[in-house]
Amino acid sequence: MRLMIVGQLEGYISIAGKIALQKGAKVIHCDDTQEALGALLNGKGADVVMCDVKQKIGPFIKALEENRLVVPVVACGIGSDTRTAVKAIQDGAKEYIPLPPDAELIAAVLAAVTQEQDTMIANDDVMKNVLKLADKIAPSEATVLITGESGTGKEIMSRYMHKKSKRKDGSFIAVNCAAIPENLLESELFGHEKGAFTGAAGRRIGKFEEANGGTLLLDEVSEMHPLLQAKLLRAIQEREITRIGSNDSVKVDVRILATSNRNLEQSVQKGEFREDLYFRLNVVNVRLPALRERPNDILPLAQFFTDKYADANGVPKKKLSKPAEEKLLAYNWRGNIRELENTMHRAILMSLEDDVEADAIHIQDSAFSSGHASSVSAPNKAPDPSGVGSAAQTSQAPNATIKNPAQVENLVGRTIADVERDMIINTLDHCLGNRTHAANILGISIRTLRNKLSQYKDEGVEVPPASGTGG
């Protein structure tokens, strides 16, 4: 873990740093938030920032967001002033640690904030075979393309492979190619020099340089613009990059992992993705099965998420009741593991019994039930850019049997635009405001989703606030 400490606090924060070092963390120190921001922009990566509460935490977190730097901030201060702690949390801090530091408290908070998302549950034989392949190729330097439907855990698999690799002590840097606007993605990957373009107030180190000696994940690489694909191919082949606004090349030593929920072979045939880049990325392919293809993992995953969110929300851990288990197994999980995680997060909060009861598990058992989902969730199918293709395919499937006529009757008299708007807003609410997750479940691009939400806001529709890294 990489810890950045910001501020002085009469030496107490240095003690906190020493405790973190004893716990195996790599620690760097900055005097103030301005120096910390500069360090992060220049490639001094951090998994968590521990910041003196007297620093300007709110503006600092806003600057991180504006520069697309995803790093949690933990505030700390002398004593246990409740108002100060609340203000820090309101400004965006994930936690507040009172000083002088308690070793166990610091260890627990840092572990919770930087909990590695690399736990792989594989009770099903299908998933066991996938893990065997991942374990075999992880120690190599081969570029790996991880494919599978949205929500199957492609980024978790990439983190798992990094932990199993020879680069495990190096950085793991992830770039969501779908969530970053096209005009900013090149700078995100390769960096830029001061004055390279409007708004480039200083040098910025790109993700290739930040991942030097470690692993770089290109998440949803299929969303990358063809012109940028050519520059990416050169960077991978030559193992060097050139920052925007510079003529000097920089050598980089990174292992590339890439993910896609699209069928890249079809994208190549359509001219949407470069064939040479596809072959360069697809040295080894790890295909993650949909959750419905690994039914023996549904209940272990459900219990794992139930325990996880019980801890996160400070509520007692509970087992799943038998009716709850039956309900979970009967569902098709079109959104895969991501949908299951969100469902169990809600369930542990809403449960009123000693065990999680079936009524606490809220899932859409009509449009996306096992009787219908199979007709609309074909693996590796390219998302419909219009945003309404899934609904159309469901209603027009040949020889389809309508299992809930009342649900269909409720749609009569409504326009396609109204139904689409409700589907998008409800899905976004289901994903706790995470735009990337919602777009994946809906089968549309993040760009299409943002355009729709902008349109709805202009129309006066209340849109769920953004949250999470994909917001």
Image (cartoon, helix red, strand yellow):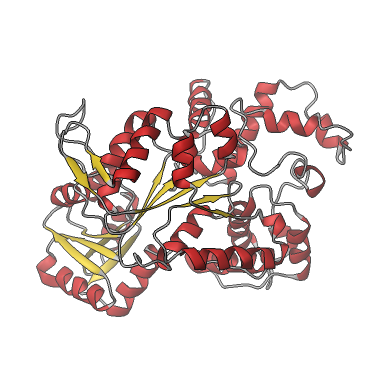
In this rendered view, identify the residue nearer to me: 129 or 26: 129
Q: Is residue 333 left or right of residue 371?
A: left
Answer left or right for 51 relative to 31: right
Q: 309 or 210: which is nearer to us?
A: 210
Where is 224 relative to 93, above or below?
above
Q: Residue at x 28, y 36 (%)?
A: 187
Quarter occupied by the N terminus:
bottom left
User: Left or right: where does residue 39 sit relative to residue 457?
Assistant: left
Q: Nearer the viewer, residue 286 or 217?
A: 286
Picture quadrant where residue 100 is located: bottom left
- Where is residue 53? Give x, y as percent: 21, 58
Tell me if I can see residue 219 in this picture: no
Q: Relative to 256, is 456 above or below?
A: above
Identify the image quadrant of residue 408.
top right
How many labels sit on residues?
0
Which quarter of the rendering shows the C terminus?
Answer: top left
Q: Residue at x 12, y 63 (%)?
A: 8
Residue sitting nearer the eye, 327 or 84: 327
Q: Position of residue 463 (x, y in %)?
A: 52, 33
Instruction: Give how far across and how far down residue 54 sits, in percent.
Output: 17, 56
In the rendered image of this protein, does residue 272 appear above or below residue 331? above
Q: Is residue 453 visible?
A: yes
Q: Residue at x 84, y 30 (%)?
A: 409
The image shows residue 451 at horizontal and vertical percentages of: 49, 25
Which residue corresponds to the image point at 41% horizontal and 63% vertical from the top-left? 140
